[in-house]
Image (cartoon, rainbow, N blue to C red):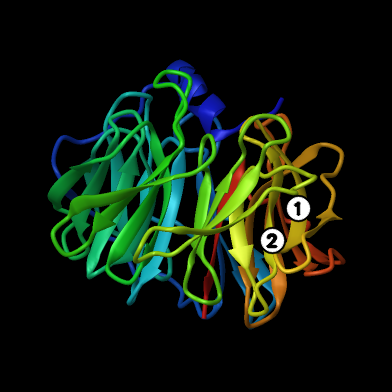
Amino acid sequence: MKKSKFLIHFAILLAVALSSCTRDEVIVVPPAPTIQDGVYVLCEGGFVPGTSKLAFYDFSNDTFYPDIYSPGTLGLFPDGIVLTGNYLYITEQGNFGSPGKIYKLDTNGTAIIASNLGVNPYNVIETNGRLYVTNGPSGIVSVVSRDNLQLLSTVNVRNYPQELTGIGNRVFVCNAGSFSTGPDSVVSVIDAGNNQVVGEIKVGKNPSTVTASTDGKLLIGCPGDSLTAAIYKVDPISLATLDTFTNLRYGLSKDLNTDAAGKLYFIGGNIYSDEDIVSYSPSTGVSEKIVPKQAGYLNYGLTYDKQSNQLYVGAAASDFSSDGRFRIYSVTGNLVKDFQIPTGIAPRRLLVKR
């Protein structure tokens, strides 16, 4: 079985209902062990509440902890995580078409406060002192207080906003489209000062990933149709397209990363599948398959660590009911470590803490 965010949205309709409070909830817990530098691994889980996990790989002792979240368990489909200051923020989609949640945790994985939020909140970033969260089915971005998780405002964007990033005082939102809303080909631009949409960037079909380039420009990845995947380089101020890279021979699904030299790393395939990990050089136009998918697993989550110059990968079991794996690769695709301790089901987000 192949699973993408679009299939997840459909499958959530069959999920067991997630019970949730109608008010903010303050969670009192005992002190947790101190976590130093490492990699957080957020696992979506299966279609049953309680199967999601927050794992952690500790650099200092080379140890993988399969679940550090406390107290209790996360709900259905947590898909966004950001670290700002001394706090982690995690978004949880919940049942399709229903309110999800946002959590504030300390860096040890201990929940401090949780709040209902929007409709299926997906990804989250921090910019200008506030949190910005995409809500796919409702076509909005929620602006949330970092302190108490209160909703400050909402911003209407387009069809099924999912991935987003911030550059300067602007937030760039990929409107990925969906089966229910139809496709989209626009990245919405929000001014983080007044939380208004100040522009739109026309790109290829279903923009699915966005990041900043080494020279401060915007890189937007679009799976397109079949072999029409493309990456767009855009000026974040003028919103002019500076370059378009279309010779992506292994496709593009998600998780666009860039190293110090400007080389790109991402998960190939398309919006319906997660395939090989691919490197791409914008200067030469050379695309290489560096980590092929392995039997029984999909390359489901990816991040690049500039300090170690390594790739951290969440490998999901292809049946999406068994545990996945956390793996470390060199930038040339050599396997550095494959942890035998399972991550939990569908390891989706990887976040480096240093």
Q: Are marks 1 and 2 in contact (CB under 8 Å)?
A: yes
Three-letter code, disc 2: Tyr
Q: Residue at x 46, y 36 (%)?
A: 185
x, y (%) of residue 285?
77, 60
Q: In this view of the protein, which residue sits in the foreground, 154 or 344?
A: 154
x, y (%) of residue 131?
27, 59
- Eyeballing the image, is 78 above or below 3? below
Quarter-wise, where is residue 149 in the image?
A: bottom left
Q: Residue at x 60, y 47 (%)?
A: 254
Identify the mark at residue 120; answer none if there is no mark.
none
Direction from residue 274 to residue 163 in the image, left or right: left
Three-letter code, disc 1: Ile
- Eyeballing the image, is 276 above or below 77? below
Direction from residue 238 to residue 235 in the image, left or right: right
Distance CA(mark 1)–CA(mark 2): 7 Å
Direction from residue 269 to residue 105 in the image, left or right: left
Residue 313 in view of the camera: yes
Direction from residue 85 to residue 144 in the image, left or right: left
| Residue placed under numbered mark 1 in the picture | 277
Q: Please tell me which of labels 1 and 2 falls first in the chain.
A: 2
Crowding at dot 1, Cα within 10 Å, few <14 / some 14-19 / many 20+, comes out as many
* Element type where label 1 sits in the image: strand
* Element type where label 2 sits in the image: strand
- Eyeballing the image, is 63 above or below 54? below
x, y (%) of residue 323?
68, 42
Residue 73 in view of the camera: no
Identify the mark at residue 265; answer none if there is no mark.
2
Q: Which residue is drawn at 24% across and 69% down?
A: 128
x, y (%) of residue 223?
62, 39
